[in-house]
Amino acid sequence: MNIMKMMKQAQQLQAGLAATQEKLASQTVTAEAAAGKVKVTATCDGSVTEIIIDPAVIDPSDAEFLQDLILKTVNDAINKGRETAAAEMKKLTGGLNLPPGFGI
């Protein structure tokens, strides 16, 4: 196998990974709970960018319910982002099972 060809392919893959990571940092996903009364938007790199809460679900005597809704929805949004990121990386690497943080 030609070492120069392999190095060129590795450089191309590295450039593609950097571009994909940049794209994922700006791509957003949204998760909803309570029939859309709680919405969380996050980037595909894991940053929560927005939380919207309909006042109808705010019950001062049951703060725990709202806390649980928010926690569930934040986790759903982050998981959607991770799934999107994994799908994008899989497209780029052609299904190679690279270990997390492989860094190419």
Image (spheres, rainbow, N blue to C red):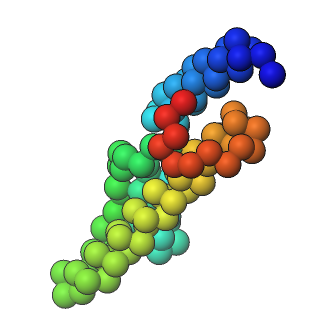
Q: Quadrant of residue 85?
A: top right
61 left or right, relative to 30:
left
Q: Quadrant of residue 11?
A: top right
Relative image position of residue 73 (x, y in whole percent)? 43, 66
Q: Is residue 83 above or below residue 20?
A: below
Relative image position of residue 4 (x, y in whole percent)? 70, 12
Q: Residue at x 64, y 23 (%)?
A: 10
Q: Nearer the viewer, residue 98 or 1?
A: 1
Q: Nearer the viewer, residue 83 or 40?
A: 83
Q: Residue at x 69, y 33 (%)?
A: 92
Q: Quadrant of the C terminus?
A: top right
Q: Quadrant of the N terminus?
A: top right
Furthest residue to the left? 60
Q: Is residue 15 above or below residue 69?
A: above
10 left or right, relative to 104:
right
Q: Nearer the viewer, residue 44 or 61?
A: 44
Relative image position of residue 33 (x, y in whole percent)? 48, 70
Q: Residue at x 35, y 70 (%)?
A: 71
Q: Nearer the viewer, residue 74 or 53?
A: 74
Q: Is residue 87 visible?
A: no
Q: Is residue 18 visible?
A: yes
Q: Is residue 61 above or below residue 2?
A: below
Q: Residue at x 34, y 78 (%)?
A: 68
Furthest residue to the right? 1
Relative image position of residue 91 (x, y in whole percent)? 72, 38
